[in-house]
Image: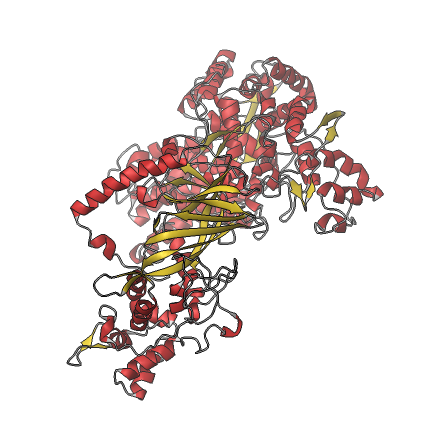
């Protein structure tokens, strides 16, 4: 996942922020209180991976129009569309492989937008300055991971490969599922998202999961908490996050996400009121999901495999790509203005009352979480469980 | 290493010629295994014993004498382990030419740092008449003071004269007083008088007809025994004024040494040596199978055990035997991850890990230092545990018993194949292996003990089963039964061999050799005293150091 926008933070006034803080503190008390009742069993995890839930079918049968091309193909088409000659374009494009391409091609690709008088415009800040030629091929396959978020079965909905449930809302996969670097599976995460998360995970506070149930081996009620830690993950000798690390829960009310649900045949199904997490700008900045749903599976190696779905403003996903700019385009092959049009078209919830344009898009995220310990930040000043006196020296002199 | 600009090169070469001459002196006088005598000039008595400084002692002395911020840049030649201790081996080791070059390189780095602009005003007790030339009086003040700390006795006149000569000639030719001192200091740091703890014997004043260490050698032996470092000012004074040769004066100094916080350094140094923890630097595990066993985790594991020992024996003045049964320890988040225990760290991200006191609950198998990752990982293979190695270590390290080496033509195939469905656990593999007659005898000695620790995998993590089969930890040692690591610790702690081993090791550690046959009665007394005092190790150390036998030469 590329860099995300900071606009939701920048546009909040001080007064508004103060009001939100007060509300957040209040929610925090409630949230902390909600975790207080003792559960018979608790399982705690640290999110190893948090990436778009990808479900590329063999032989790319879910993309009958073919996959969106390589970075070279995409950039070539874009530069030719704004009138650059074949020779000039080819000369510029040879420089982008494996790098940023240099200032000449960056200038050409960033300012490939045109105003009404034909003058160059910033294509990322003003994506509509690039014509919508339906440059981004959509995924037309029948399967995608996720949830029936709206309770309906529509023509653009998928079937979930795990549950076979129909009516799955995952319009983001519909929009971007034919991007080469977003194609993956349950066991093989897509390259671009995993690369970003792998880097971001070293820099951001870890994301945590706590499960509470009377007995995980039986059907029954379950509560899922998703928190933010106060520490980063630490890697082990093989370079992946270390298992059974102890994290402190960040008490900030914004990152206290609770899902209520059931365990049925060993599978967790849970729903929440809201979901919000803060990550690193390189990966996931401020992710807010509406009507979030959670489904989790206990793996033999002690990890938790899960999917998390919900609606978020489609412009957040656009800004994530556009903030990456030409580097994002050159590395991923994503045509950012085309992404704008594609997301806008695929958006499937919360229509604007004035225009009727949907403002939100359904998404699904894949989570792999490894065993960890979660402790309260109030334990900061106290040792793990006991303090030995260093002063009671009974040594004979 | 200090670098000199081009205009000073000629002066440097002149100084280097002087130091080369003195270095040749040092090399010529370096002791070898068979010729370790008469290295001191005009010695007042016979040379009794020489022990090369361990890397840790070298570091500690440099920091004690020149400051805690002086870095040691280089590696030291290894010291062999003899009679279970490096400290004994250090008295039986020569120095190769390559090893000497390392010492010389390290000495250059230390001297350059110690006399740089930051440190010289603290270390040099006077100001030179001119910084651009020699000042014999000021140089003598510095060299006498530092020389006593480095050689652990006052310099003999000819030694001081030699160092003065280096400092004066180098300062004159290099037109730099401190450059002259630096070259002289480099020279002292490669002399055998510094690199080897040399002990001198004189006729005993308390036991007529025998010989004992002279006062400065006593001070050195005491200081290294209790603090693992060079004597401090008060100890030197006690040696100088003769009070250390009196029972009252000796007791006063021993009490002071034991009361000092630096006793922890000495205690840690002894147990690092006894438990072979120097070998932990070489331990590696299969990263695919044991990804949590990183270098940091290994370092923390060693520190965990040393903290546990130091806390129990020094801070709590606890019973030595309880080291095998204590549930109290100290952990970092790194170890918490390895042991699957929650350990909260309140340090900001990226800061060194915080140590937290931790007490394992009743019923937990992680009891005593033998269940720490340090011990079980050290005595295991990279990809699997080894009840045999663990049992051997228990016999040799903890009980001072000798386990014969395996014959050269042993077939280890059954033991090494951890995937054989016929032999899922180490016990089953060992049973199959021990059917070979040549193996049975030794495995009976080692394996029952090691199998009690099978719940701890090669990286120190806990496991309930192996290859899906439950682990049987029942066994017997010297006729006493145990059912798991917890009861093993109780049994081991109660074995007479465990406490007598500690007495013997500690005595040998202090003496630099095993106690002589004529000292058998003394060590027996020490064992009685150890028991009488509730197996308090600090009390044992005091008893050892307060005995005339502690300062006797081996020839007695």
Q: Is residue B373 left or right of residue A115?
A: right
Residue A324 in sight in this render: yes
Q: Residue at x 70, y 49 (%)?
A: B418
Residue B86 % position (x, y):
59, 36
In the image, residue B44 sits, relative to residue A72, either above or below, namely above
Residue A99 in sight in this render: no
Quarter assignment of residue A365: bottom left
Q: Residue at x 74, y 40 (%)?
A: B427
Q: Is residue B324 left or right of residue B409?
A: left
Residue A116 % position (x, y):
16, 79
The front one of B329 and A220 is A220
Quarter of the picture holding the C terminus of chain B: top right
The front one of B153 and B39 is B153
Residue B325 % position (x, y):
60, 25
The front one of A193 and B41 is A193
The front one of A152 and B1 is A152
Residue B419 % position (x, y):
70, 51
Residue at the far right in the pictured view: B437
């Amino acid at each position: 996942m590329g860099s995300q926008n900071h606009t939701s933070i920048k546009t909040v006034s001080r007064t508004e922020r103060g009001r939100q803080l007060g509300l957040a503190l209040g929610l925090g008390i409630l949230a902390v209180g909600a975790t207080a009742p003792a559960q018979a069993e608790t399982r705690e995890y640290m999110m190893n991976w948090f990436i778009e839930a990808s479900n590329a079918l063999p032989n790319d049968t879910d993309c009958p129009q073919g996959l969106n091309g390589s970075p070279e193909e995409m950039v070539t088409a874009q530069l030719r569309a704004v009138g650059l000659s074949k020779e000039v374009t080819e000369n510029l494009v040879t420089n982008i492989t494996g790098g940023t391409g240099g200032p000449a091609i960056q200038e050409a690709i960033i300012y490939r937008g045109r105003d009404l008088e034909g003058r160059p415009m910033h294509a990322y800040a003003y994506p509509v300055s690039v014509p919508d030629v339906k440059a981004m091929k959509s995924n037309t396959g029948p399967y995608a991971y996720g949830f029936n978020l709206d309770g309906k079965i529509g023509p653009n909905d998928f079937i979930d490969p795990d549950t076979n449930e129909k009516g799955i809302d995952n319009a983001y996969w519909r929009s971007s599922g034919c991007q080469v670097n977003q194609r993956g599976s349950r066991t093989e995460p897509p390259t671009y998202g995993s690369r970003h998360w792998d880097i971001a995970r070293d820099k951001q506070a870890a994301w945590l999961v706590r499960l509470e149930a009377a007995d995980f081996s039986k059907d029954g009620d379950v509560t899922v908490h998703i928190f933010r830690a106060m520490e980063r993950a630490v890697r082990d000798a093989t370079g992946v996050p270390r298992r059974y690390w102890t994290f402190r829960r960040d008490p900030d009310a914004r990152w206290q996400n609770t899902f209520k649900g059931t365990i049925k045949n060993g599978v967790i199904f849970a729903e929440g009121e809201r979901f919000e997490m803060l990550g690193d700008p390189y990966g996931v900045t401020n992710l807010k999901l509406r009507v979030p749903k959670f489904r989790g599976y206990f793996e033999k190696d002690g990890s938790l495999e899960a999917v998390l779905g919900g609606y978020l403003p489609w412009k957040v996903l656009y800004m994530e790509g556009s903030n990456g700019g030409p580097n994002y385009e050159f590395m991923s092959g994503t045509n950012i203005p085309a992404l704008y049009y594609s997301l806008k078209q695929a958006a499937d919830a919360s229509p604007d009352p004035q225009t009727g344009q949907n403002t939100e898009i359904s998404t699904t995220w894949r989570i792999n979480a490894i065993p960890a310990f979660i402790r309260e930040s109030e334990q900061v000043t106290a040792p793990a469980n006991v303090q030995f006196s260093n002063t009671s020296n009974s040594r004979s002199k | 290493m200090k670098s000199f600009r081009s205009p000073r090169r000629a002066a440097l070469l002149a100084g280097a010629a002087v130091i080369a001459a003195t270095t040749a002196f040092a090399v010529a006088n370096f002791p070898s295994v068979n010729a370790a005598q008469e290295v001191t000039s005009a010695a007042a008595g016979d040379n009794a014993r020489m022990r090369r400084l361990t890397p840790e002692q070298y570091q500690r002395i440099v920091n004690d004498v020149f400051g805690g911020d002086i870095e040691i840049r280089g590696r030291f030649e290894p010291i062999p382990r003899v009679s279970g201790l490096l400290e004994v081996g250090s008295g039986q080791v020569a120095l190769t030419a390559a090893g000497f070059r390392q010492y010389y390189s390290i000495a250059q780095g230390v001297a350059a740092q110690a006399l740089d602009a930051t440190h010289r005003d603290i270390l040099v007790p006077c100001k030179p008449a001119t910084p651009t030339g020699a000042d014999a009086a000021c140089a003598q003040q510095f060299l006498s003071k530092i020389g006593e700390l480095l050689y652990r006795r006052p310099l003999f006149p000819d030694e001081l004269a030699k160092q003065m000569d280096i400092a004066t000639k180098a300062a004159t030719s290099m037109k730099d007083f401190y450059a002259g001192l630096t070259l002289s200091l480099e020279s002292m740091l490669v002399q055998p008088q510094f690199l080897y703890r040399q002990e001198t014997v004189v006729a005993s004043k308390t036991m007529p007809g025998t010989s004992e260490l002279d006062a400065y050698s006593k001070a050195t032996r005491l200081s290294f025994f209790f603090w693992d470092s060079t004597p401090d000012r008060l100890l030197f004074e006690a040696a100088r004024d003769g009070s250390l040769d009196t029972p009252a004066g000796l007791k006063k100094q021993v009490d002071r040494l034991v009361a000092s916080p630096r006793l922890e350094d000495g205690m840690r140094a002894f147990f690092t040596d006894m438990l072979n923890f120097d070998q932990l630097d070489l331990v590696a595990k299969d990263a695919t199978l044991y990804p949590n066993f990183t270098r940091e985790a290994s370092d923390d594991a060693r520190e965990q055990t040393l903290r546990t020992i130091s806390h129990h024996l020094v801070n709590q003045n606890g019973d030595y035997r309880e080291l095998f049964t204590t549930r109290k320890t100290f952990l970092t988040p790194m170890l918490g991850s390895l042991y699957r225990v929650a350990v909260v760290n309140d340090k900001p991200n990226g800061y060194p890990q915080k140590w937290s006191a931790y007490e394992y609950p009743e019923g937990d198998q992680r009891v005593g230092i033998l269940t720490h990752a340090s011990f079980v990982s050290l005595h295991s293979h990279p990809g699997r545990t080894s009840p045999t190695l663990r049992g051997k270590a228990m016999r040799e390290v903890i009980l001072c018993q000798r386990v014969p080496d395996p014959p050269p033509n042993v077939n280890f195939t059954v033991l090494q194949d951890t995937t054989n469905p016929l032999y899922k656990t180490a016990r089953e593999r060992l049973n199959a292996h021990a059917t070979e007659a040549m193996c049975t005898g030794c495995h009976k000695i080692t394996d029952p003990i090691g199998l009690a620790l099978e719940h701890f995998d090669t990286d120190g993590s806990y496991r309930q089963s192996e290859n899906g089969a439950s682990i049987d930890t029942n066994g017997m040692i010297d006729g006493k039964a145990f059912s798991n690591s917890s009861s093993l610790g109780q049994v081991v702690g109660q074995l007479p061999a465990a406490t007598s081993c500690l007495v013997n090791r500690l005595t040998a550690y202090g003496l630099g050799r095993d106690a002589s046959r004529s000292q058998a009665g003394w060590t027996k007394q020490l064992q009685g005293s150890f028991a009488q005092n509730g197996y308090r190790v600090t009390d044992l150390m005091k008893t050892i150091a307060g005995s005339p036998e502690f300062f006797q030469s081996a020839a007695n």
